[in-house]
Image: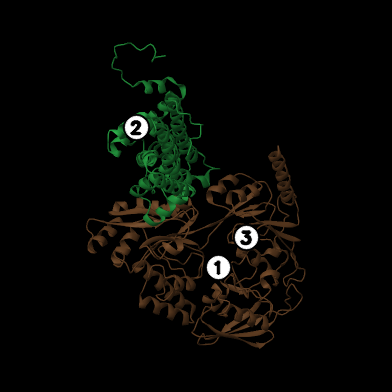
Amino acid sequence: MTASTAPLTRRRRMFPAWFRDVLSRPSGAIGLAIIVVHLAIALLAPMVVPYDFAAQDSKAMFADPSAQHWLGGDHLGRDVLTRTLMGGREAILVSTMATGVAVLWGGLFGIFLAFAGRFVDEASMRMVDALLAIPWILFVMLFVAGLGTGMGVLIPILGISYGLSIVRIVRAAALDVVTRDFILAARARGERRSVVIVHEMLPNVLDTLAVQAAMTWSWMLLGFSSLSFLGFGATPPTPDWGLMIADARSAMMVSPWPVLAPMIALSSLIIGINLLSDGLAKALGVDRMKKSAV
Amino acid sequence: MEFRMIGAAAAVAALMTLSPLVGHADDTLRLAWDEDWGGAESLDPISPNRHYMINDIIYSRLMREDDHGEPIPELATAWSASDDAMEWTIDLRDGVTFHDGTSFDAADVVYTFDRIMDPAIDSPVASVLQIIDHVEIIDDDMVKIVLSSPHADLPLLLLDYRIRMIPEGSGDTIAETGIGSGPFMLESFDPQGTSRLIAFPDYWEGAPKLAAVEVYSIPDSDARIQALLAGQIDMAGASFQQARLFQGNDAFVVQVYPAGSWQAIVFRTDTPPFDDPRVRKAIRIAADRQAFIDLVLGEGNGEIACDNPVWKGDPYRADIDCAQDIEGAKALLAEAGYPDGIAFDVYTSNLESEMVPIAEVYQQQVAPAGIKVNVVMAPADGYWSDVWMVESASITSWSERPADQILNEAYRSTSSWNETYYNNPDFDALLDRARSELDPAKRAELYGDAQRMLFEDGGSFIPYNMNGLRVVSSELTNIPGDHNDNWIRWELVTKDGATN
């Protein structure tokens, strides 16, 4: 609609067209709103939370919600509201940065493979297939067991393991583009391969990459929280949703809030990201349900 | 469609398997086995995989504990030591029969001990009895235990829950037959399903009041609590959080009993900065132990321990004062060369539900003394091999043991489980003297000195002994509320109490 009736003189707009398109779709708008709220909470939480996240109080152990503790207390009497509000900070930071790593290496390597000769492409893809056959959690644990669980370890490892599927999808998208005339022209001009990749190929697979990035972000968030749940992610007493759920689950029947609050927080953010990636996919014309060719 | 059929069939099958649980047999005690050893459970009392729940019911020991933890007669009727505590003579009970009809005598006792000490069997129980040189028959009703070094408290060692009398020559079959002399005998054994024991009419203390005991495998703790709430089992251990579900419910009695298991942060005394006794003491006295009980276990679910592995129910427990002393800790740290405080890692894992909270509470407790603790999470798999006794500070967990056993097992310089790498010849010498001291009062003093030495100089921070907690159907009678399951006289238990 906007495209056909656009005025001839281009006015500067606050947002580019594809973004306005995302916002015009309910899934995109709602998803983005949820994410913005979560990011705002994560940024502002340290300034607004009512308690110290690590302060223990035996009188508030498994306390029911009250005026003092709106969401009650956990197994060490710590304020569940405080810990839930703070609980996304590390998860969001790690998952965002790891998504960046995954998109960067997965995207560039995927495009490179579309260019590379048949032998390199085949060999690399079979290797990617082999690595994809290993469950990601096993893959991550192999490294975590040896290197520890710091952010400096988790971000690259999560990035590398989740980047594998991006390699596959971006390569497929790039193979569609690589035989187009403008690419052939660029190569005929004698452009360096890196220039062709960055200036000619990348813009043309960016829509696929954007949708994939959003989906990877939500998987990454779930992945990091699973690691925390298992004791390999955030370190106590850091407030972290996965860790909070793990700590409180044994007392779930008598004290549900310490489990419910982080569960609701985590799932709402994941739903928000998924809604956004759905909106993105529709706006950019990338069908999420369609299987890409290999 | 097919899937739906399979689903329905599975549901029916599940109901059929569960149906024996639903029945309300008034003459059958129903218990839950809470371990999951993948079916490797053995009825051999000295196997590392011993099914200790069933074994406690089908076998007998020479002695059992009285209310104060002192040995009283079971299959032994009397015992006495030579003046040098090197030889013990034990009188055996007459008229005791095994489940296969053979009678119990001195040859069975010698066989049982020889088997425990047999290097070819390599039982974990052998280390408990390593001071025994040999056991010999005096006559049918009397044996003599000859020691290789003096031990005035041998009967305390013989209380070990694994030292159970089996018939002579039964070693090869005992793991399946379970032939003992206890109040119930084995009818069927399925450690991952249902095992059934039936009353042994010839039990030497009289036939049991109930007809049978059934043991269901329910390794998941929440499932166990649900089974108890639904009336499918008659009693189960519970955590203090779970016990809240039974509050105000007349159909159940919640029993909290003092017990000797303990957890601790162990600091390797051979590794800096913990090789300095002043640092060790500072990082222990900086914590308020009551806070550990209140926060980690829940108020009233533990007894304060002063870095003292001997529990309150043990006759040799020493009284030590270990109030929190932040200023004292700061002074000790300054003296040791850390005027600005100290920082170190403490390794933990979510292997047991208290192991992470202990580290978190410790971190908060000692911070005011300038002690900065960094909690490091380690995988539960391999924790005991890769972290415990490897890293310089980690969390440990021990079950209840008598004073002599735990002091020797966890702190003697030569012990393989000397987890703090404690190497103090004075401490070892104290333990040797205590073992050979025949006067009980002097012996208590020596064991007390050893415990005080650990508080001054040792490497374990032991904040508490954990109470046990058991939820019992109010139908049951004769379940002693102030002791662990080893004290239950299974032949006396009835289901005549108040009904649901």
Report the chain shown in brown.
B
Side of A62 where A239 appears, left or right = left
Q: CA distance from mark 2 to mark 3?
A: 85 Å
Query: Are the numbered discs 2 and 3 placed on the same chain, yes or no?
Result: no
Is residue B290 in view?
no
Q: Which mark is residue A183?
A: 2
In front here: B378 or B316?
Answer: B378
Report the chain shown in green.
A
Residue A102 against residue B103 in the figure, above or below: above
Q: Which mark is residue A260?
A: none
In front here: B96 or B4?
Answer: B4
In front here: B374 or A135?
Answer: A135
> In the picture, residue B416 is in which quadrant?
bottom left
Q: Name the subunit of mark 1.
A: B
Which of pointers 2 and 1 indicates the residue nearer the eye? 2
Q: Give the mark nearer the N terminus: 1 vs 3.
A: 1
Quadrant containing the N terminus of chain B in the rendered view: top right
Q: Residue furthest front?
A: A188
Mark 3 residue element: loop
Label 1 sits on residue: B68
Q: Name the subunit of mark 3.
A: B
Residue B103 against residue B315 in the figure, above or below: below
